[in-house]
Amino acid sequence: MFRLAILLGAGNAVLAIILGAFAAHALQNTLSERMLAVFNTAVDYHLYHALGLIVLSLLIKQRPISKALKTAVYLMSFGIIVFCGSLYALSLSGILKLGMITPFGGVAFIIAWFLVLIAFIKQEPQV
């Protein structure tokens, strides 16, 4: 699971940076200010959660039996696909109905971070 989480995190970080550069250089004159802001929100959350996946990989390496941390990896990945993906698609296509699925990705992010919190609340202190 460590390897999967680090690959997902690093791969998504690369993708988020590429998409951010694409927005800054290619989309600035193509999208409206509102849609560019939506695209950039997706880039921000994409990068935050890519870094979150990298952090999770390191935590899983220390606590390989934590089901909460492993589940958080899947939820963050799902959140990136649904939250960020829907915002990317909405901003590029202008189909506002795509925003209807965005909250499902946001809820996945919230639950993932809550599971990280729970994993450490339940954790016995290390001496």
Image (cartoon, rainbow, N blue to C red):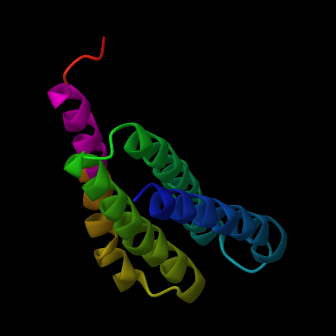
The x, y position of residue 71, in whole percent, is 26, 57
Q: Is residue 116 above or below residue 40?
A: above
Q: Residue at x 38, y 45 (%)?
A: 60
In the displayed orientation, state which residue is furthest to the top. 127
- 120 or 50: nearer the eye? 120
Give the side of residue 46 with respect to residue 106, left or right.
right
| Segment colored magenta | 112-123
Q: Residue 93 magenta-drawn?
A: no
Q: Quadrant of residue 6?
A: bottom right
Q: Residue at x 30, y 76 (%)?
A: 101
- 70 or 95: nearer the eye? 70
The quarter in which the C terminus is drawn is top left
In the displayed orientation, state which residue is furthest to the left. 122
Give the side of residue 39 with respect to residue 21, left or right.
left
| Residue 42 visible in this rendered orientation of the protein | no
Q: Is residue 81 above or below residue 3?
A: below
Give the main secondary structure of the magenta stretch: helix
Q: Quadrant of residue 27?
A: bottom right
The x, y position of residue 73, in whole percent, is 36, 58
| Residue 47 visible in this rendered orientation of the protein | yes
Q: Is residue 50 above or below residue 94?
A: above
How many discs appear? 0
In the displayed orientation, state which residue is furthest to the right. 25
The x, y position of residue 11, in whole percent, is 61, 66
Q: Residue at x 41, y 81 (%)?
A: 96
